[in-house]
Amino acid sequence: MNSKKRLLIDLALFVALLVANNPAWTGIAVHEWLSIAIVIPLGLHLVINWEWTVHVARRLFDRLLHMSALNLVVDVALFVSAVAVMLSGLMVSHVITGALGLATTPSAIWAATHAVSASATVALLFTHLALHWRWVARTIESLSHGTREVAR
């Protein structure tokens, strides 16, 4: 997949995650459905970047203090927090579970888990963006000049 498509998917995912993070902006129904819809581009992002992740994991054992190791740690933490926010979101859901014919009884623990993991996901998302900022900037620059692919 070329850099332009990857960047567009990543930007759309970034915006969707930020919008979904605050249900006051959209209402509970949009918050829940958007959060479910994010699963597909998130999976696509993981598949697209799988080779890079495997490459970094291999290098992690060679250079523990290298920046790639930090990237991997942030990416793993981001994945774990995203899964936690999704699972806890289902546990506190009013709209999605009702549409699926399921009944949940939201508890304070699930609500707290959802709030904390959502905040962690946003913080890790910004960290992820900061760690990959050079690639984003180079890709935007190359797209504005009509040049070819930018390696990650």
Image (spheres, helix red, strand yellow):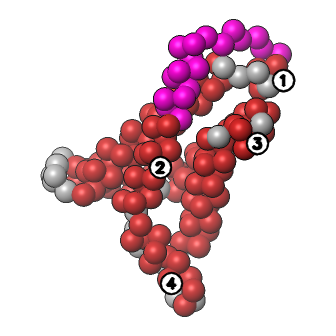
Question: Could you tell me if residue 33 is visible in this image?
Answer: no
Residue 91 can be seen in this image: yes
Residue in view at x 45 percent, y 53 percent: 126
- Which of the two discs, 3 and 4, sits closer to the camera? 3
Say whether disc 2 or disc 3 marks the residue closer to the N-terminus: 3
Residue segment shown in magenta: 100-118
Residue 114, magenta (yes or no): yes
Tell me the quadrant of the picture where the C terminus can be found: bottom left
Give the percent coordinates (x, y) of residue 88.
Answer: 58, 23
Question: In this figure, which residue is indicated by the disc labeled 1?
Answer: 99
Q: Quadrant of residue 33?
A: top right
Task: Locate residue 34 relative to residue 4 in the image: left or right.
Answer: right
Mark 2, secondary structure of its residue: helix
* Other residues around mark 3 within 10 Å, as few (<14) / some (14–19) / many (≥20): some
Q: Residue at x 33, y 52 (%)?
A: 71
N-term-proximal mark, 1 vs 4: 1
Real-space Cα distance between discs 2 and 1? Answer: 29 Å
Identify residue for label 2. 125
Cα separation between marks 2 and 3: 20 Å
Which mark sits nearer the N-terminus, 3 or 4? 3
Residue at x 50%, y 83% (from the top left corner) = 141
Mark 4, residue position = 142
Q: Is residue 97 above or below residue 115?
A: above
Kind of element beneath mark 3: helix
Tag 2–tag 3 contact (CB < 8 Å): no
Q: Which mark is residue 26?
A: 3
Query: Which x, y percent locates residue 12?
Result: 64, 58
Q: Position of residue 121 (x, y in %)?
A: 49, 40
On screen, residue 45 versus residue 69, left or right, reads right
Mark 1 is on which residue type?
Ala
